[in-house]
Image: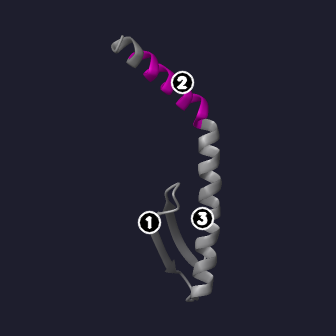
Amino acid sequence: KADVDMNVVATDKDRFVELQATAEGATFTDEELQSMISLARSGIASLISMQREVLAPTIAEVDSMARQRLTKKFR
Protein backbone atom coordinates (compact mmCIF):
# COMPACT_ATOMS: atom_id res chain seq x y z
CA LYS A 1 0.00 0.00 0.00
CA ALA A 2 2.99 2.30 -0.40
CA ASP A 3 2.54 5.52 -2.34
CA VAL A 4 6.26 5.68 -3.13
CA ASP A 5 8.83 2.94 -3.58
CA MET A 6 12.25 4.33 -2.65
CA ASN A 7 15.69 2.74 -2.39
CA VAL A 8 18.52 4.69 -0.78
CA VAL A 9 22.06 3.39 -0.30
CA ALA A 10 24.76 5.65 1.11
CA THR A 11 28.25 5.40 2.55
CA ASP A 12 29.40 6.33 6.04
CA LYS A 13 30.64 9.58 4.47
CA ASP A 14 27.02 10.44 3.57
CA ARG A 15 27.60 9.93 -0.15
CA PHE A 16 24.97 8.21 -2.23
CA VAL A 17 25.59 4.87 -3.88
CA GLU A 18 21.99 4.49 -5.06
CA LEU A 19 18.97 6.73 -5.00
CA GLN A 20 15.82 5.48 -6.72
CA ALA A 21 12.25 6.60 -6.12
CA THR A 22 9.09 5.74 -8.00
CA ALA A 23 5.56 6.98 -7.42
CA GLU A 24 3.33 3.92 -7.02
CA GLY A 25 0.03 5.75 -6.74
CA ALA A 26 0.08 9.52 -6.80
CA THR A 27 2.98 11.83 -7.57
CA PHE A 28 5.13 13.32 -4.80
CA THR A 29 6.57 16.77 -4.24
CA ASP A 30 10.17 17.90 -3.86
CA GLU A 31 9.40 18.60 -0.19
CA GLU A 32 8.23 14.99 0.26
CA LEU A 33 11.31 13.71 -1.58
CA GLN A 34 13.61 15.72 0.67
CA SER A 35 11.76 14.39 3.72
CA MET A 36 12.19 10.79 2.52
CA ILE A 37 15.90 11.35 1.85
CA SER A 38 16.32 12.87 5.31
CA LEU A 39 14.58 9.90 6.91
CA ALA A 40 16.73 7.49 4.88
CA ARG A 41 19.93 9.28 5.92
CA SER A 42 18.92 9.06 9.56
CA GLY A 43 18.20 5.33 9.23
CA ILE A 44 21.46 4.69 7.40
CA ALA A 45 23.43 6.56 10.09
CA SER A 46 21.75 4.42 12.77
CA LEU A 47 22.57 1.22 10.89
CA ILE A 48 26.20 2.23 10.41
CA SER A 49 26.50 3.05 14.11
CA MET A 50 25.07 -0.34 15.09
CA GLN A 51 27.33 -2.14 12.60
CA ARG A 52 30.41 -0.40 13.99
CA GLU A 53 29.40 -1.31 17.54
CA VAL A 54 28.80 -4.97 16.68
CA LEU A 55 31.93 -5.29 14.53
CA ALA A 56 34.32 -3.40 16.85
CA PRO A 57 35.58 -6.50 18.70
CA THR A 58 36.17 -8.38 15.44
CA ILE A 59 37.97 -5.44 13.86
CA ALA A 60 40.15 -5.06 16.96
CA GLU A 61 41.01 -8.78 16.85
CA VAL A 62 41.88 -8.68 13.14
CA ASP A 63 43.97 -5.54 13.69
CA SER A 64 45.83 -7.22 16.55
CA MET A 65 46.52 -10.33 14.46
CA ALA A 66 47.78 -8.22 11.56
CA ARG A 67 50.09 -6.24 13.85
CA GLN A 68 51.49 -9.46 15.35
CA ARG A 69 52.19 -10.90 11.91
CA LEU A 70 53.87 -7.69 10.74
CA THR A 71 55.99 -7.56 13.89
CA LYS A 72 57.16 -11.17 13.34
CA LYS A 73 57.84 -10.54 9.65
CA PHE A 74 59.97 -7.42 10.18
CA ARG A 75 61.97 -8.46 13.24
Q: Position of residue 71 (x, y in %)?
A: 41, 15
**Residue topped by disc 2:** 61
Residue, disc 1: 18
Q: Where is residue 62 in the image (x, y as percent from the top left)?
A: 49, 26
- The crowding category of the residue bearing disc 3, from other C-alpha atoms within 10 Å (few below 14, some 14 to 19, many at least 20), is many
Q: Which badge, 2 or 1, is on the more N-terminal residue?
A: 1
User: Residue at horizontal 59%, vertical 58%?
Assistant: 44
Where in the figure is residue 54, as x and y percent of width and height? 63, 37
Taking the spot 62% from the left edge, 83% from the top edge, the residue there is 32
Mark 3 or mark 1, earlier in chain: 1
Quarter holding residue 42? bottom right
Q: What element carries label 2?
A: helix
Residue visible at 49% across and 76% down?
21
- In the rendered view, tell whether residue 53 sits above or below residue 35: above
**What kind of element bears circle 3?**
helix
Residue stretch in magenta: 55-69
Q: Residues within 10 Å of mark 2 (few under 14, many from 20)?
A: few
* Mark 2–mark 1 CB contact (< 8 Å): no
**Above-or-below relation of 5 to 15:** below
Residue hosting label 3: 41
Whether the magenta-drawn stretch holds residue 59 is answered as: yes
